[in-house]
Image (spheres, coloured by chain):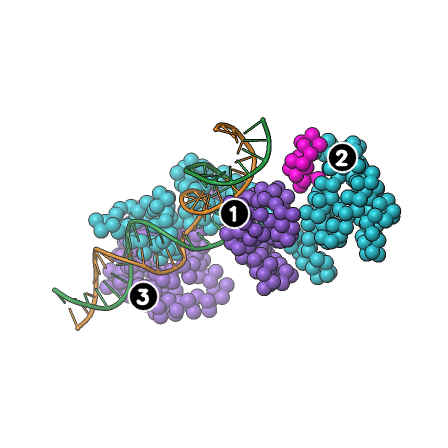
Chain colours: A purple, B cyan, C orange, D green
Amino acid sequence: MQWSIQQIARLSGTTSRTLRHYDDLGLLPPTSIGANGYRYYDEAALTRLQRILLLRELGLGLPAIAEVLAGQTDDAAALEAHLRWLEQERDRVDRQIASVTTTILKLEGGEQLMAEEMLDGFDHTVYKDEVEQRWGAEAYATSDRWWRGLGADGQAAFRAEAAAIEAGLRDARASGTPVDDPAVQGLIARHYAWVRAGWGGSAPSAEAYLGLGDMYVADPRFAQNYGGLDGAEYVRDAMRVYAAAELG
Amino acid sequence: MQWSIQQIARLSGTTSRTLRHYDDLGLLPPTSIGANGYRYYDEAALTRLQRILLLRELGLGLPAIAEVLAGQTDDAAALEAHLRWLEQERDRVDRQIASVTTTILKLEGGEQLMAEEMLDGFDHTVYKDEVEQRWGAEAYATSDRWWRGLGADGQAAFRAEAAAIEAGLRDARASGTPVDDPAVQGLIARHYAWVRAGWGGSAPSAEAYLGLGDMYVADPRFAQNYGGLDGAEYVRDAMRVYAAAELG
DNA sequence: CTTGACCTTGACGCTGCGTCAACCTCTACC
DNA sequence: GGTAGAGGTTGACGCAGCGTCAAGGTCAAG
């Protein structure tokens, strides 16, 4: 008993294209091939196809199915492995659903995207390469050790100080206070201390501190945090005044 | 303030390849291109990139992101649509996890895959094309109406009769009873009646009945049901005897 | 001999880049 | 001014699993 490719497709509920694909992969070679090139399949092939389709419905990939059919892998083992992958997938999707949901809620609350969302204080790892490039790998490692050593409470305090400074600078700018005003320079002094703490206690050079100011203007994550690009420039200018006066 | 492609990549935590890809897609064209072909980006581009990456982390596709950035789609609307897709995905993964888990349990219970798993009685719709091809669209439609008209109880009874006949035939074969034995032919008579019921009460011709026997041998889903290929051939042979004697 | 229905072998398309390959360019050091 | 090294460019293949033309043989029926 032999069938053509279409008949097999109908019997198994798939398509002839799929069968040819499986032939190309060596997953299901036809039982025989006519002189005209036609593919013919027998019961054994049909049975094999049923197994393939069953495993495929469970979500296994074709290479994995091939291994099972070749007897290189146990059915159960393959399914267990696949199950773990599926669970990973579920977790990933769950996390994305949570993220998207909270993002939608924030949007409904009138918040703009991207403000604190992205930076959340001071994401330490994102800037690894940038820090290493500018100030060396050792500087980053030192900073990283320090940051981890702070613990959750210390990190929260560190962020709180940053938020306080930011708020002060925003107010100063909003009220039109010039950057060389003593009030602003006082805030910048706190900022410099804050940065120094972040650098493991060693005092940043004027050059490094000015570079940081440029980075605030350059990186929208910082810029947004300081009230938009103009705000970042305001902060940078204040830092320049400070550096010229105190770090010269 | 301008940056090279590598600098932007580091600042944003992505790769230069990705940036070139976004350029190709028109998603993030560089601010300017040097005479040497180098791409340069400014703050505006960096901000745009941040939005892209944020939406990408939420799982949106690049075309969807492009729409949002072009202002054609509202952020919230895009995220809502995406959320529904994510929920679908979660359900799909959940279903697969359930399937794979039960399959593993069955394997541990010593069951072979594919036996009742695939057929589960008599899946009426799977054979639609096959039935239509062999006996016409009207025959299928008639049979289908009848089957649905049975209701769950009627269908269960119909399956029970099939199971009883199958069990009887399996026993007969196991005990070496020849296919022309009156006991076997009695079972086949019940089978013929069963098939006739399935055909809406009209009596199948000898030809159609013999074709059905061949189908049992041909299709592993039936063959497995009747105790393997040999079992299916036993049944087919018994049907041939019956057809010759009663339907000639 | 002409329809159709069915068969064949390519080959592109889709998603989002990773990953060579082959070949300029710019900077820094000798 | 040569050379090394880091960084830039444009192709183009690869991955998963087929869907979907395209162009052209084959076969049974009228």
Q: Which residue is mark 3?
A: A135
x, y percent for residue B112: 70, 57
- The kind of residue on which mark 1 rests is Ala
Q: Nearer the viewer, mark 1 or mark 2?
A: 1
Classify mark 3: residues with Cα within 10 Å, few (<14), some (14-19) or many (20+): few
Chain that bears disc 1: A
x, y percent for residue B11: 36, 56
Q: Nearer the viewer, mark 3 or mark 1?
A: 1
Residue B205, numbered circle? 2
Indicate whether residue B9 is drawn in magenta.
Answer: no
Q: Quadrant of residue A66?
A: bottom right
Q: Is residue A68 found left or right of C26 in the rendered image?
A: right
Is residue A216 visible in this depiction of the protein?
Answer: no
What residue sits 60% from the left and 58% below the top?
A69
Range of residues picked out in magenta = B124-139
Residue A35, numbered circle? 1
User: Dot 3 lies on which element?
Assistant: helix
Q: Main secondary structure of the magenta part?
A: helix
